[in-house]
Image (tube, rainbow, N blue to C red):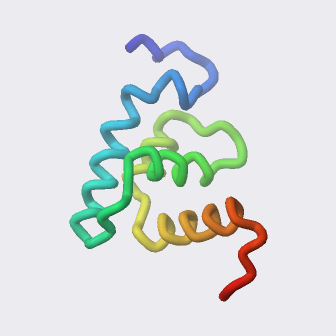
Amino acid sequence: MEHALDPVFDWDSYLPDLLPLCEAKAEEFRSLGYHAVTADEVLGCARSMFRETPMLHQAVAAILGLNIGRFMSHATVSAWRRNPGNDSV
């Protein structure tokens, strides 16, 4: 892909390059017993780590450096946001 001169990082234009990294991270989490983790969930978690648009190397580092604790925290918060009426603890 020809992205070297792109001044602004665009997640969507790099999806073909980033999804294999996300899949590798999801496989790592599955090997730890978290069998339902998908590459899309890993990508969503990595995207949520940035308030502003990151540079490509920052996005790659976020994906590859993601640990299971951070991922599960993101998944929990996301689940609560999807179901705001769920008051059971």
Residue 76's place in the image compared with 12, above or below, is below
Closer to the camera in the image, 71 or 36? 36
Residue drawn at (47%, 51%), measured in percent from left and top? 41
Query: Does 28 sit left or right of 82 as displayed?
Result: left
Quadrant that contains the N terminus: top left
Closer to the camera in the image, 8 or 80? 80
Horizontal and vertical percent position of residue 62: 48, 51
Q: State which quadrant residue 40 falls in.
A: top left
Residue drawn at (46%, 26%), measured in percent from left and top? 14
Horizontal and vertical percent position of residue 11: 55, 31
Residue drawn at (26%, 60%), measured in percent from left and top? 28
Q: State which quadrant residue 89 falls in.
A: bottom right
Residue 19's place in the image compared with 29, above or below, is above
Residue drawn at (41%, 66%), measured in percent from left and top? 67
Query: Does 23 sit left or right of 85 as displayed?
Result: left
Horizontal and vertical percent position of residue 75: 54, 64
Direction right: furthest residue: 85
Closer to the camera in the image, 86 or 61? 86
Horizontal and vertical percent position of residue 77: 64, 68
Residue 2's place in the image compared with 29, above or below, is above
Direction bottom: furthest residue: 89
Query: Does 81 sit left or right of 21 as displayed?
Result: right
Residue 75's place in the image compared with 4, above or below, is below
